[in-house]
Image (cartoon, rainbow, N blue to C red):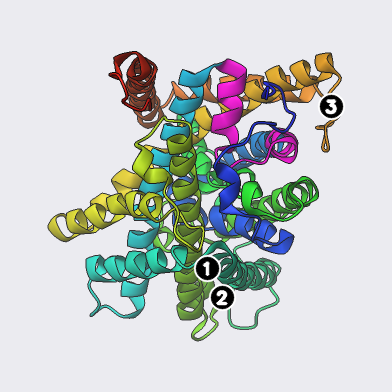
């Protein structure tokens, strides 16, 4: 049967439905929060403020606007065609198979780096509370534990992630309340700094546009992972309704949590303070609440592990989808009786284990490198989603396809997202750090695209090479 190239659900039979709709809508929504509220907020926020000063708020507002548009675009496509390949599949339909495979592999590379970063980040935070515990050993234990969780089945994984995400959302709300009380002078044993840090020590933007540009890429890392909602739609009951609800709730909650938290941190802690190494704990220390800094540090550990959990899920499903489309080794599409792509899970967590060994050999050097790597890859993925939505929406409208969820403001809002993304790339070329990050990402994209093209040629040539009586692959 014919498979539509538009946004309509594919009508051909594939192996992918074997994953099964085991996740509930509430689990999908909390997974979106769980994947995004992790290392980027609890650790990366301090790095962003150090890079741009209080002007990092501009970076967050710009990136936040972009992610809203991207999530709306992804929601439209995922509701019409829920697939574990998500934007990789949509890019393939819109721009060709090589483009789709490139985006899929790029996102997988991004997530395996993030998995390692979150394991090491959680271990590093826990070491501030229990210094006797080696960072590399704790990271190893964390990845082993969450590999086991991801192998138990989607329903158990989804419930585990739901409660993890709920805990850290509650903690961030409490942090915002304490921060507001501190800034308003309502805490008896802590002096309010007011907004003095927004003008002192070099002003609002001490490093100028270059600092804001560098901050944008730190922020992009922070928001990266939100798109996992579109991946998880394939294993969610009633995906059309669930995706729409998840997109709406995840977007506004993340913006409130991120913008609110960054405002409090930047107002309370100077941009050049060493307290920004653990910004949430630094704020609570200044608030004079006994034991609160330790509690928020432990919550931050939970948040990082929750994000690790969600990102390992997303990475395994993406590489599983690539294998289904013959864009990755076919062993990666094997499923257990619990409908879990176990080989894909193992492949996705392998880099994290390697990173722990590197942390043992080079303490305190691995995590900063990992955080610096993944920021601009998010922008490439988001750009592919926006362009694909424009192409597929026009195609669907021309064919008269009825879509279960339609993005408002099309095509102007989608086009604005593309323009905004192009402006971020242009601004990124100003700062030395962001420029180096962009160039390295472009090299990575070119290498992945070349590999995808060669693999497609190899796969296409296999039937012709098969001998008499030999099955075609």
Tell which circle, 2 or 3, labels the residue nearer the N-terminal end.
Answer: 2
Left or right: residue 179 compared with residue 336: right
What residue do we see at 35% from left, 68% from top?
Answer: 142
In the picture of the structure, the residue carrying the numbered disc 2 is 287
- Mark 1 to mark 3: distance in Å? 40 Å
358 shown above or below 318: below
State yes or no: residue 89 in magenta: yes
Q: Main secondary structure of the magenta part?
A: helix
Tell which circle, 1 or 3, labels the residue nearer the N-terminal end.
Answer: 1
- Give coordinates of residue 42: x percent, y percent: 49, 60
What residue do we see at 41% from left, 66% from top?
Answer: 146
- Give coordinates of residue 116: x percent, y percent: 34, 54
- Give coordinates of residue 252: x percent, y percent: 74, 51
Quarter placement of the C terminus: top left
- Mark 2 or mark 3, whichever is nearer to me: 3
Query: What span is in magenta?
Result: 72-95
The quarter of the displayed image where residue 128 is located:
bottom left
Q: Nearer the viewer, residue 337 or 318?
A: 337
The quarter of the displayed image where residue 169 is located:
bottom right
Q: Helix, strand, or loop for circle 2? A: helix
In the picture of the structure, the residue carrying the numbered disc 1 is 283
Q: Are marks 1 and 2 in contact (CB under 8 Å)?
A: yes
What residue do we see at 37% from left, 47% from top?
Answer: 112
Q: Residue furthest left?
A: 361
- Mark 1 or mark 3, whichever is nearer to me: 3
Q: Which mark is residue 409?
A: 3
- Mark 1 to mark 2: distance in Å? 6 Å
- Mark 2 to mark 3: distance in Å? 44 Å
């Amino acid at each position: 049967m014919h498979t539509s190239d538009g946004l309509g659900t594919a009508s051909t039979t594939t192996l992918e439905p074997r994953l099964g709709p085991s996740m509930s809508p509430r689990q999908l929504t909390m997974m979106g929060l769980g994947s995004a509220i992790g290392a980027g907020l609890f650790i990366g926020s301090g790095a962003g403020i150090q890079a741009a000063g209080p002007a990092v708020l501009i970076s967050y507002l710009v990136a936040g606007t972009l992610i809203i548009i991207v999530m709306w675009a992804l929601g439209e496509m995922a509701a019409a065609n829920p697939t574990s390949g998500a934007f990789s599949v949509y890019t393939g339909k819109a721009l060709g198979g090589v483009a789709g495979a490139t985006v899929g592999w790029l996102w997988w590379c991004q997530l395996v780096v993030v998995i390692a970063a979150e394991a090491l980040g959680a271990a590093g935070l826990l070491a501030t509370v229990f210094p006797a515990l080696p960072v590399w050993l704790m990271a190893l234990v964390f990845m082993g534990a969450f590999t086991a969780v991801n192998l138990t089945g989607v329903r158990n994984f989804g419930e585990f992630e739901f409660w993890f995400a709920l805990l850290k959302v509650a903690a961030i709300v409490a942090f915002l309340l304490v921060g507001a009380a501190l800034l308003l002078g309502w805490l008896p044993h802590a002096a309010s700094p007011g907004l003095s840090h927004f003008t002192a020590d070099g002003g609002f933007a001490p490093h100028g546009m270059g600092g804001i540009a560098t901050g944008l890429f730190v922020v992009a890392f922070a928001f990266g992972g939100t798109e996992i909602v579109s991946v998880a739609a394939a294993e969610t009951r009633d995906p059309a309704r669930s995706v729409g609800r998840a997109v709406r709730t995840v977007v506004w909650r993340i913006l409130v949590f991120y913008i609110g938290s960054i405002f409090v941190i930047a107002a309370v802690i100077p941009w050049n303070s060493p307290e920004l190494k653990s910004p949430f704990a630094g704020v609570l220390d200044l608030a004079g609440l006994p034991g609160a800094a330790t509690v928020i540090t432990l919550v931050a550990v939970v948040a990082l592990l929750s994000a690790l959990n969600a990102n390992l899920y997303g990475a395994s499903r993406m590489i599983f989808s690539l294998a289904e489309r013959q864009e990755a080794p076919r062993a990666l599409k094997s499923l257990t009786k619990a409908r879990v792509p176990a080989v894909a899970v193992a492949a996705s967590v392998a880099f994290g284990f390697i990173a722990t060994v590197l942390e043992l050999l080079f303490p305190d050097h691995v995590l900063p490198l990992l955080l610096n790597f993944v920021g601009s890859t998010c922008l490439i993925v988001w750009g592919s989603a926006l362009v694909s939505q424009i192409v597929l929406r026009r195609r669907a409208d021309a064919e008269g396809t009825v879509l279960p969820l339609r993005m408002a403001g099309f095509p102007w809002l989608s086009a604005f997202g593309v323009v905004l993304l192009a402006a971020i790339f242009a601004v990124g070329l100003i700062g030395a750090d962001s420029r180096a990050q962009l160039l390295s990402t472009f090299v990575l994209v070119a290498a992945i695209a070349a590999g995808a093209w060669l693999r497609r040629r190899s796969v296409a040539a296999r039937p012709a090479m098969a001998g008499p009586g030999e099955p075609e692959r």
